[in-house]
Image (tube, helix red, strand yellow):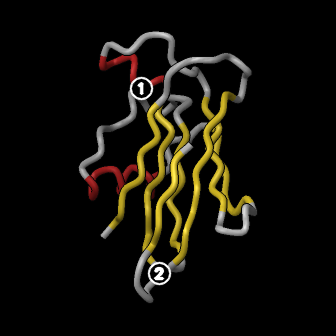
Amino acid sequence: SAGFVIAGTTAQTVLIRACGPSLVGFGVTSVIPNPTLTLYNSSSSAIASNTGWGANPAISSAVTLTGAFSFASPTSLDAALLVTLEPGAYSVVSSSATGLAGFELIEIYEVK
């Protein structure tokens, strides 16, 4: 899990990723093959979730804008959310959609 804060008075767009399968290209073994990513607000209410990013063009564009590494393929089972959030505290939890344990990387980028 990871946490972050949107400061100030203006909403911000963020790219949140749970990278599992795409880490194999960087030599990481025993990755979570299909992560599920869930975003929670400060009241611990789930406000967004994703399993398998599905080659979403808006996410691809945000990856380019932020300089994040590209997922291994458009069909990779990595998870990603592109959301605009009001100022406040948030947490992100990633788990295995299939129940298989492994390594993963949670990333949070501000998209400008």
The residue positioned 48% from the left and 52% from the top of the image is 16
The N terminus is located in which quarter?
top right
Residue extending farthest to the bottom is 9
Where is residue 73 shown, x and y percent of the image? 42, 29
* Residue plotted at (56% across, 18% down): 102
Q: What element carries label 2?
A: loop
For label 2, count other residues whose C-alpha is less than 10 Å away and answer few (under 14), some (14-19) or many (20+).
some
Circle 1 or circle 2, nearest the eye? 2
Q: 95 or 50: nearer the eye? A: 95
Type of amino acid under label 1: Ser
Say which residue label 2 marks.
11
As measured in the structure, the alpha-carbon distance from the residue carrying label 1 to the one carrying label 2 is 30 Å
Position of residue 89 relative to residue 76, above or below, is below
Residue 22 numbered mark, or none: 1
Q: In this view, does 96 lie to the left or right of 15?
A: right
Q: In this view, does 58 lie above or below 26?
A: below
Left-right relation of 84 to 93 = left
Residue 10: assigned label: none
What residue is shown at x 54% (from left), y 75% (from top)?
A: 88
- Residue type at mark 2 is Ala
Outermost residue on the left side: it is: 67
Would you say the residues marked 1 and 2 are in contact, meaning their CB atoms lie under 8 Å apart? no
In the picture, the quarter occupied by the C terminus is: bottom left
